[in-house]
């Protein structure tokens, strides 16, 4: 069941058709949107201008609308969490799924992240206007 702040009809439709275990890719403006997810994945473009819509706003809206079980992020070249990842972790710290479980976070290096995002269970790619590098997230939908 979808509830929350999202008003974008194609985004709502894509979330409503995704189920437990489906993956949603929140991609920054630099991500290869045309080739970085399966052809079967829906694509929603929220990247009107630089910074519109930022990744953190999308992540917060998604976490209020669906149960997010896990988030995998693209690690920096040094193997760390980017500034955007740290900000999103802080923003989503209180979000819970299932029986009150916290979101599980993990990082993947760039090429492994691209491979994970091309898997057949990725059902949605959301293109953001986020220009800060390494601002890419792969969310796993859980149970409420």
Image: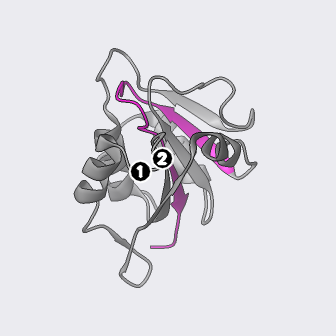
Instruction: Tell me: 26 left or right of 50.
Output: right
Left of 119 or right of it: where is 108? left
- Of all residues shown, which one is farthest toward the top? 49
Q: Earlier in the sequence, mark 2 or mark 1?
A: 2
Q: Farthest bottom residue? A: 99
Q: Is residue 37 visible?
A: yes
Residue furthest front in the image: 78
Q: CA distance from mark 2 to mark 1?
A: 5 Å
Q: Quadrant of the C terminus?
A: bottom left
Q: Secondary structure at mark 2?
A: loop
Residue for point 69% across, 26% down: 35
Q: Nearer the viewer, residue 108 or 91?
A: 108
Report the magenta residues as a range. 122-144
Q: Do residues under tags 2 and 1 come within 8 Å of each other at their CB atoms?
A: yes
Residue 3's place in the image compared with 131, above or below, is below
- Image: 34 above or below 25: above
Image height of 114 relative to 60, above or below:
above
Q: Residues within 10 Å of mark 1 (few under 14, many from 20)?
A: some
Pick the residue in front: 52 or 144.
Answer: 52
Q: Is residue 6 visible?
A: no
What residue is shown with label 2?
A: 75
Dot 2: few (<14), some (14–19), or many (≥20) neighbours within 10 Å? Answer: many
Q: Position of residue 97 (x, y in %)?
A: 41, 73
**Magenta region includes residue 133:** yes
Q: Which residue is mark 1?
A: 80
Nearer the observer, 43 or 104: 104
């Amino acid at each position: 069941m979808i509830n929350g702040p999202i008003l974008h009809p194609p985004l709502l439709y894509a979330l409503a058709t995704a189920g437990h275990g489906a993956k949603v890719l929140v991609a920054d403006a630099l991500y290869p949107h045309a080739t970085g997810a399966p052809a079967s994945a829906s694509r929603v473009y929220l990247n009107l201008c630089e910074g519109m819509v930022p990744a953190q706003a999308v992540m917060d809206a998604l976490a209020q609308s669906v149960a997010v079980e896990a988030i995998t992020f693209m690690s920096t070249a040094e193997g760390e969490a980017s500034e955007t990842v740290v900000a999103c972790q802080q923003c989503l710290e209180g979000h819970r799924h299932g029986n009150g479980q916290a979101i599980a976070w993990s990082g993947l290096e760039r090429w492994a992240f691209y491979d994970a995002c091309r898997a057949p269970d990725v059902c949605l790619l959301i293109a953001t206007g986020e220009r800060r590098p390494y601002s890419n997230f792969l969310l796993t939908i859980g149970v409420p």
